[in-house]
Structures are given as C-alpha cells and as structure tokens.
Amino acid sequence: MKKEFFRKLAEKENGKFYFHDENIALPNGVRSPNVTFKVLFDYKANKFEIENRTGTAYVGIINCKLTPTLQPIEFNIETISHLKNLILRKESRFRIKSDNKNIVYFLTKNDSLKDLSKVANKENFSPLMTCEKKDNWNITTKYHLEFDNWTDVVEPIIELYKNLIDEFEKRIANISEKAYREMN
C-alpha cells in the first residue's frame, strides 16, 4: 500500500520512483528489514527528493534544493510537545522562527502548514523544518514515521514547499510588514 502511494506520487509529479527492500544482518543472526521509498521530481527547476525509510530507522526526509534565481528567507519550524501545548494552549503545534516577520506571517497563514498542524495534534508527528543555505539553499523536513498513516503528511509538505517557492519568486518578503500584509 505504501509502495503504491509513492508510485502514484511520482506519476502525479512527473518524477521517478525508487523502491529498495532488503534485510540487514544484525549481530546474533538477527535480520531486520530495511525498506526505502524514494521519489525525485522537479517543480519550476527546484529539485525535490522524498525519502522514507522503515526497518532499522523509521525516518522521513523531504528536501528541496532551490534554484539560485530564488531569494529564499531563512526560517526554522519546530514542534511544540503535546504536554507543553496543553499549558500554552496554542492553536498550532508549530513554533516558527525567522528574523523576517513576513515569512513568519506567510507560514502562519499557509493552509498546508495548518493541515500539518492538525496531523501533529492528532498523531505523534513532530517534524523539524528548515530553510537555510549551506552550499545551496534548501528546504528540508525531517520527521520520524512512528505514527499511523505517515504518508498523510507527504503531500501537504510538498504543497507547502511549492507555496514557498512561489512566494520566494515574488521577491517581496523584504518589504515592510505593513505593505506585505496589505498585499497578502
């Protein structure tokens, strides 16, 4: 079922699907499954790579290498624990950090991020998302897969990335907060 989800995702995005299934030999003759689902595709020349691994590690990583023509804004999104959220009573389970208030505003209003927050409220979904420059600008989300229906978060994350790419193309995130909010 998961394999079919990623195959259909690759078709939908005109990308490529890769599947790897092997058993890893561990000490004492124990064998552990190691299954990797990978999808690669482009959106406006930005390179997406979705990788979900189960078996020895239950990890999802969605990365997008951004084109040099964009003007990204650095940000970080962390998850507030269920316990801490009970005390804080925040609507969203996510804490957005950035020196740019316009990108924070954009992210708080984004429907895809709201959908991901709903999943985080119901499930043990605790992603760490960053947009930063190392060698290139990348948007990366890392999360564990130890919750039911972990494929439910893949498409909203992709949609969020696409929304960010469209926003970065506008090159308006560095205008005044007032002007930005009037435009959005």
Image: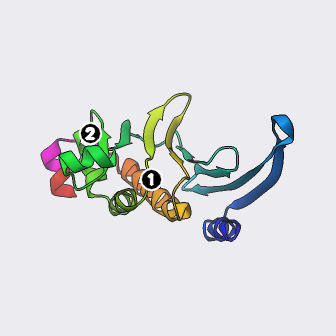
The verdict on residue 122 being magenta is no
Q: Is residue 93 above or below residue 10?
A: above
Q: Nearer the viewer, mark 1 or mark 2?
A: 1
Q: Which mark is residue 125?
A: 1
Q: Residue furthest top?
A: 134
Q: Amino acid at mark 2?
A: Asn
Q: Find residue 4 and report its horizontal and vertical position in percent.
A: 69, 71
Quadrant for residue 6, please give it.
Answer: bottom right
Q: Quadrant of the C terminus?
A: bottom left
Q: Amino acid at mark 1?
A: Phe
| Left or right placement of residue 90 versus residue 131 in this view | left
Residue under the image location 32 percent in, 60 percent down: 114
Quadrant for residue 151, please give it.
Answer: bottom right
Q: Find residue 1 and report its horizontal and vertical position in percent.
A: 67, 71
State if disc 2 and disc 1 touch (CB < 8 Å): no
**Judging from the image, what secondary structure is the residue with disc 2 in?**
loop
Q: Residue furthest front?
A: 28
Q: Is residue 16 visible?
A: yes
Residue under the image location 19 percent in, 51 percent down: 89
Q: Is residue 73 visible?
A: no
Residue under the image location 44 percent in, 39 percent down: 130
| Left or right placement of residue 164 versus residue 146 in this view | left
**Judging from the image, what secondary structure is the residue with disc 1 in?**
loop
Pick the residue in front: 28 or 118. Answer: 28
Identify residue for label 2. Answer: 174
Q: In this picture, which residue range is highlighted in magenta?
A: 173-179
